[in-house]
Image (cartoon, rainbow, N blue to C red):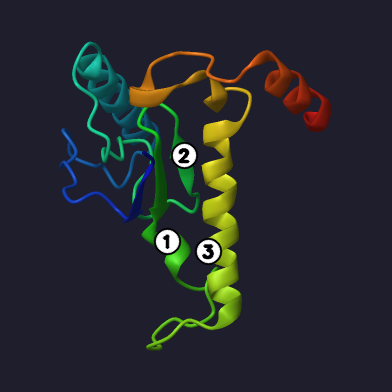
Amino acid sequence: DMIMAVGGPAKVAPLPFKVDPGSWFNNSVNIAQSLTHHQIKRVGGVLQRDDWGRELGPMSVNAFYNIHQNALFVPAALLQRPFLSSEGSDHLPPQDFGSLGGLAGHEMSHGFDSVGRMFGPGMTIKNWWDKATVEEYKDRAQ
């Protein structure tokens, strides 16, 4: 069962260092070290299906599908102008529904592409397509 998370994570962890407005390089190194440390701590742990990770957050202008969580993430940055045309209104025009549907459909398709098809129920690594389906997929994907 695929989950869809919209907006951003429920909690955002504070940065483990002080941002220096005058040193882009030091900030970049600190961010890289922080991300690496966070990923290493997660090895062997239980993966939370709604974990946005630290690489992308609500300010990211990119929806994404995480194959290991079987989860689709739509950051808040995609829910405002210029991507949606109705910022501040009480309703979405039809083109906004179409844009969101296309975005969600595209990301969902990654769960069934050449990599996604290798994950079965419970996110077990299993080729759950029969041989004929694999061959048909390869033919159509050309």
State the residue at coordinates (40%, 88%): 89
Secondary structure beneath dot 2 equals strand
Q: Which corner quadrant of the image does residue 85 belong to?
A: bottom right
Residue hosting label 2: 65
Residue hosting label 3: 100
In the rendered image of this protein, does residue 135 appear above or below residue 63?
above
Three-letter code for the amino acid on which mark 1 is drawn = Ala
Secondary structure beneath dot 3 equals helix
Taking depth in this image into account, of 134 and 81 the one nearest to the observer is 134
Taking depth in this image into account, of 49 and 135 the one nearest to the observer is 135
Residue hosting label 1: 77
State the residue at coordinates (37%, 88%): 90
Gap in Å between the C-alphas at discs 2 and 3? 14 Å
User: In the figure, is residue 31 to the left or right of 15?
Assistant: right
Gap in Å between the C-alphas at discs 3 and 1? 13 Å
Gap in Å between the C-alphas at discs 2 and 1? 16 Å
Secondary structure beneath dot 1 equals helix
Residues packed near mark 1 inside 10 Å, few (<14), some (14 to 19) or many (20 plus): some
